[in-house]
Amino acid sequence: MKKLLGVVIMLLVAVVLISCESTSTTTQTTKTEKQVTAPTIKAPWADCGVGSWIHYKTFLPDDTIVEAKETMVKLENDTALIERSVLTNGEWISQGTAPVKLTGMYQTPIPKEATQTETLKIGNKEVHCKIVVMVATMGENKTEIFQWMSHDVPGGLVKKAMGGKVVREVVAFEKK
């Protein structure tokens, strides 16, 4: 049973990670639904060194909280290897690693016209964030997505809220 629960949690985290990383189906808008063009920026892990990590919580619709950690375990040329782990029964279980390209420019959902700023406290650190507001459309339904982004935090995503509820939040990090 514990093994099955671990597999279910791994699948849920994978779905959340994929949805957090994929913005290709999201329309970027301002509050007036005017579409804006997003600028390009460098990769979120580009300014990090080996050993940089984030620890975050993902809040699922059934009130389950999944804790996960991403750590840069290797840096070679223009690629970082990021290990993802999930906290299961008090133990960090590796979900494997994924390469992340660190060079070149990425299209980002941070249009200057649609952002606000806010300072969040993570542990004893103050993190200055840009708040990105997007609208995801699925059929007739539209959902506002708020993302707090910062280059001071490995991976860039500090907090994410959908439908008025926080769905992901960094609780600790170290940038080397």
Image (cartoon, rainbow, N blue to C red):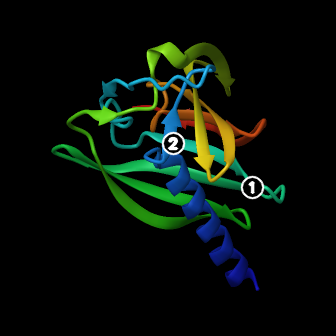
The quadrant holding residue 77 is top left
Q: Horizontally, is 82 left or right of 31 in the view?
A: left
What amino acid is labelled 1 in the image? Leu
Q: Name the one closer to the observer, 74 or 140.
A: 140
Marks 1 and 2 sit apart, C-alpha to C-alpha, by: 20 Å
CB-based contact (under 8 Å), mark 1 and mark 2: no
Q: Residues within 10 Å of mark 2 (few under 14, many from 20)?
A: some
Q: Horizontally, is 150 left or right of 2 in the view?
A: left
Which circle's residue, 1 or 2, is located before the other in the chain? Answer: 2
Tell me the tag on residue 60.
Answer: 1
Q: Name the one closer to the observer, 17 or 116.
A: 116
Residue 113, given in percent of the width and then of the height, sits at: 49, 14
Residue 68, given in percent of the width and then of the height, sits at: 60, 53
Which residue in the rendered view is the most extreme toward the right? Answer: 63
Q: Secondary structure at mark 1?
A: loop
**Image quadrant occupied by the C terminus:** top left
Residue 93, given in percent of the width and then of the height, sits at: 57, 67
Q: Horizontally, is 133 left or right of 43 in the view?
A: right
Q: Secondary structure at mark 2?
A: strand
> What residue sits right under mark 2 in the picture?
26
